[in-house]
Amino acid sequence: MDQATLASWHDFYLTLGTAAASLIGLLFVALSLNLDAVMGESREDLRAVAEQAFNSFSAVLLIAVCFLIPQHNPGDLGVVYVMLAIIGGYRMLRRAPGVWRGRQRDRLGRMAFWRLVLPALALLGLAASGLGLLDDQPSALYWLVAVILGFLMSAARSSWDLLVKVGEERHSAHGAG
């Protein structure tokens, strides 16, 4: 794979990196405004949802930033993406117990898909894309698009669920008070 092929993806990754950084910032603002709703031992499930959204948005940002490093080659990029997938897998396994405990407040099937299955598939896809780049396969660049979409869909859904849950709890607290 030549530099021209990599350069042709520049604008795509620049746009993704900008969007992911903006969404991370918005997530921080939303959490800051509702900090009391996600703090405390009984709110581990909401913190796990917030962390999952943050990790998925961060994965997209890191994929884009690494791609935008000037003068890189596909092999180096492949190594970085495999490492990102391993680190992401570790973080997901660390977060899984909190997500699992939150199943009492959520339907298990929907929660499992958006917070566990889809991010896990995206991480596997990231590792596979990294290995494809190590093998100099141009198709790996297209697989990364699916990976990024998986991360973005998972993060957006988790952010939405977090917003709705915090809103419902505030609404019921104001109604009871």
Image: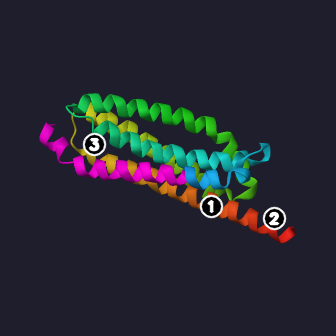
- The residue under label 3 is which amino acid type? Ala
Picture quadrant of residue 114: bottom right
Q: Secondary structure at mark 1?
A: helix
| Residue 140 visible in image | yes
Upstream in sequence: badge 1 or badge 3: 3
The quadrant of the rendering that contains the C terminus is bottom right
Please check the rendered image and state whether residue 13 is part of the magenta-colored stretch, yes or no: yes
Picture disc at residue 163 = 1
Please check the rendered image and state whether residue 21 is part of the magenta-colored stretch, yes or no: yes
Residue at the spot 25% in from the left edge and 29% down from the top edge: 75
**Residue 50 in picture, x, y percent from top left:** 60, 49
Few, some or many residues within 10 Å of mark 1 (<14, 14–19, 20+)? some
**Residue 135 in picture, x, y percent from top left:** 24, 31
**Distance from Cα at disc 2 to Cα at disc 1:** 15 Å
Q: Is residue 125 left or right of residue 97?
A: left
The quadrant of the rendering that contains the N terminus is top left
Picture quadrant of residue 92: top right
**Residue 61 in picture, x, y percent from top left:** 40, 44
Upstream in sequence: badge 3 or badge 2: 3
Upstream in sequence: badge 2 or badge 1: 1
Front label number (1 vs 3): 1
Marks 1 and 3 close (CB-CB < 8 Å): no
The answer to whether 131 is drawn above or below residue 29 in the figure is above
Q: What residue is pinned by disc 3?
A: 140
Residue at the spot 47% in from the left edge and 48% down from the top edge: 57
**In this picture, which residue range is highlighted in magenta?**
1-27
How many marks are shown on the rendered structure?
A: 3
Picture disc at residue 173 = 2
Colour pattern: rainbow
Few, some or many residues within 10 Å of mark 2 (<14, 14–19, 20+)? few
